[in-house]
């Protein structure tokens, strides 16, 4: 969380991370749906989210998805990379591979080999 530490900011942060985590397996966690959940306009929501989280909503969502994917690879080695990708909201393995490589500097298959 960014340096904003008011109780209102902490509640907003918790509400948004909970909502994102609940939807992480869906193909597209929609920012407009998060704004509606927060009862805010899309513009106001983006501004507030960036102020509280220190990054744009889509960047935070992608980072959260990648953290979830890495945790799944660690905790469930029996799952295929395709299944991990699907459970993290990716319909296409190549998109998942590119996103994982951008996030962690290696392909998911390399990560699996290094962390067994």
Image (cartoon, rainbow, N blue to C red):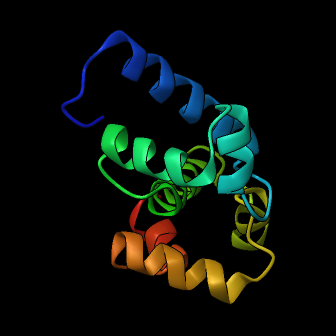
Residue drawn where x is 35% and y is 55% of the image: 55
When the figure is inspected, residue 85 is found, relative to residue 109, above or below; the finding is: above
Residue drawn where x is 52% and y is 77% of the image: 99
The foreground one among 57 and 99 is 57
When the figure is inspected, residue 16 is found, relative to residue 88, above or below; the finding is: above
When the figure is inspected, residue 2 is found, relative to residue 9, above or below; the finding is: below
Q: Pick out the residue farthest to the bottom.
A: 94
Counting the numbered discs, the total is 0
Q: Position of residue 75 (x, y in %)?
A: 59, 43
Q: Position of residue 16 (x, y in %)?
A: 57, 34
Q: Quadrant of residue 20?
A: top right
Q: Position of residue 115 (x, y in %)?
A: 42, 59
Horizontally, is 58 left or right of 114 in the view?
right
Q: Quadrant of residue 81?
A: bottom right
Residue drawn where x is 75% and y is 63% of the image: 28
Q: Pick out the residue farthest to the left.
A: 3
Horizontally, is 13 left or right of 21 in the view?
left
The foreground one among 97 and 60 is 60
Residue drawn where x is 57% and y is 49% of the image: 68
Horizontally, is 1 left or right of 49 in the view?
left
* Quarter of the figure that contains the N terminus: top left
Q: Position of residue 112 (x, y in %)?
A: 51, 67
Q: Quadrant of residue 9?
A: top left
Horizontally, is 91 left or right of 14 in the view?
right
């Amino acid at each position: 969380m960014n340096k904003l530490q008011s109780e209102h900011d902490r509640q907003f942060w918790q509400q948004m991370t909970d909502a994102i985590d609940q939807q992480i397996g869906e193909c597209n966690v929609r920012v407009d749906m998060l704004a509606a959940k927060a009862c805010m306009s899309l513009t106001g929501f983006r501004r507030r989210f960036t102020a509280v989280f220190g990054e744009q909503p889509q960047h935070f969502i992608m980072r959260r998805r990648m953290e979830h994917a890495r945790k799944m690879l660690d905790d469930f080695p029996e799952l295929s990379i395709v299944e991990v990708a699907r459970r993290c909201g990716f319909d296409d393995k190549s998109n998942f591979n590119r996103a994982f490589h951008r996030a962690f500097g290696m392909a998911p298959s390399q990560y699996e080999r290094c962390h067994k």
